[in-house]
C-alpha cells in the first residue's frame, strides 16, 4: 500500500497542519505493515510554480518533469494525507498549484455525454485542516473543506475525511485544546484500507 503525504503550510516547524498530517501518517505506519510513504513538501523543496501558459505548453522540460512526477505520485497512491491550513479563507496557493497538476483530463477525470466522470475513485484522502479562527462550514467563510471535497469528488474520490483544529490563534489554551482534540480524532479514526 502506498501513502502520499503532502504538506502545504509555509510555517515549517511552527505549522499545526504539518504536525497533524505527520500524526496521521504515523498512525497509518503503526497499523499498516509494509506501508510505503512518500512525503512532498509543496511549500519547500517540492514546490510547483503556479500554472500558466508555459506550464500547459510544457515549454520548460524541468517544470514538465516535475508536473508529471506530481501526477504520477498521486496516481500511484492508495491514500493521500494532506496538510491544508486556511489562508485568507481558502487553501494555500502552493496546494492549488499541486491540484492544477493532478486535475488532468484523460488521467484523473474525463468528459462524457452524461457529464464529467472521475477516474480515481479507489483512493482515500485524509485532510489535516487548520484554522487560526473559528470558521464552521455554515459560516460562509470556510472555503477549504467545500473546495477540497469538490476537487476530490470531481475526480471520483468520495472517501475524504477531515481532521480539523480551529481557533488556533485565539489563545494558547484554545490552540492546545484544538490540537489535543484533533489528535484524539486521529487515534480514533478507522483505517478502512489498512485491513
Image (cartoon, rainbow, N blue to C red):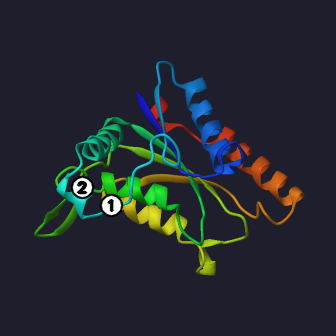
Of residues 123 and 176, which is closer to you in this image?
A: 176
* Residue 103 at x, y percent in the picture: 29, 56
- Residues packed near mark 1 inside 10 Å, few (<14), some (14 to 19) or many (20 plus): some
Of residues 171 and 182, which is closer to you in this image?
A: 171
* Residue 68 at x, y percent in the picture: 26, 43
In this rendering, position of residue 48 left or right of residue 162:
left
Circle 1: element type = loop
The residue that disc 1 covers is: 51
**Mark 2 or mark 1, which is nearer to you?**
1
Please identify the residue farthest to the bottom as the structure is shown: 140
- Which comes before the other along the chain, label 2 or label 1? 1
Q: Estimate the spatial distance between the alpha carbons at disc 2 and disc 1, rounded to whole Å.
A: 12 Å
The residue shown at (40%, 27%) is 1
In this rendering, position of residue 157 left or right of residue 55:
right
The residue shown at (83%, 51%) is 176
The residue shown at (24%, 55%) is 104
Circle 2: element type = loop
In this rendering, position of residue 124 left or right of residue 154:
right
Work out whether 64 lies above or below 55: above
- Residues packed near mark 2 inside 10 Å, few (<14), some (14 to 19) or many (20 plus): few
The residue that disc 2 covers is: 104
Amino acid at each position: 500500500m502506498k501513502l502520499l503525504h503532502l504538506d502545504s503550510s509555509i510555517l515549517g516547524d511552527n505549522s499545526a497542519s504539518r504536525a497533524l498530517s505527520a500524526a496521521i501518517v504515523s498512525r497509518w505506519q503503526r497499523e499498516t505493515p509494509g506501508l510505503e510513504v512518500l512525503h512532498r513538501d509543496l511549500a519547500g523543496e517540492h514546490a510547483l510554480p503556479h500554472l500558466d501558459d508555459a506550464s500547459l505548453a510544457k515549454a520548460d522540460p524541468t517544470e514538465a518533469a516535475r508536473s508529471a512526477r506530481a501526477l504520477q505520485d498521486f496516481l500511484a497512491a492508495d491514500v493521500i494525507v494532506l496538510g491544508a491550513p486556511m489562508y485568507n479563507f481558502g487553501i494555500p496557493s502552493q496546494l492549488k498549484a499541486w491540484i492544477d497538476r493532478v486535475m488532468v483530463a484523460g488521467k484523473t477525470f474525463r468528459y462524457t455525454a452524461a457529464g464529467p466522470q472521475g477516474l480515481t475513485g479507489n483512493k482515500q484522502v485524509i485532510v489535516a485542516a487548520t484554522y487560526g479562527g473559528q470558521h464552521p462550514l455554515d459560516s460562509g467563510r470556510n472555503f477549504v473543506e467545500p473546495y477540497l471535497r469538490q476537487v476530490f469528488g470531481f475526480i471520483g474520490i468520495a472517501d475524504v475525511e477531515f481532521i480539523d483544529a480551529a481557533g488556533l490563534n485565539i489563545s494558547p489554551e484554545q490552540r492546545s485544546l484544538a490540537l489535543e482534540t484533533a489528535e484524539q480524532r486521529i487515534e480514533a479514526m478507522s483505517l478502512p484500507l489498512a485491513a
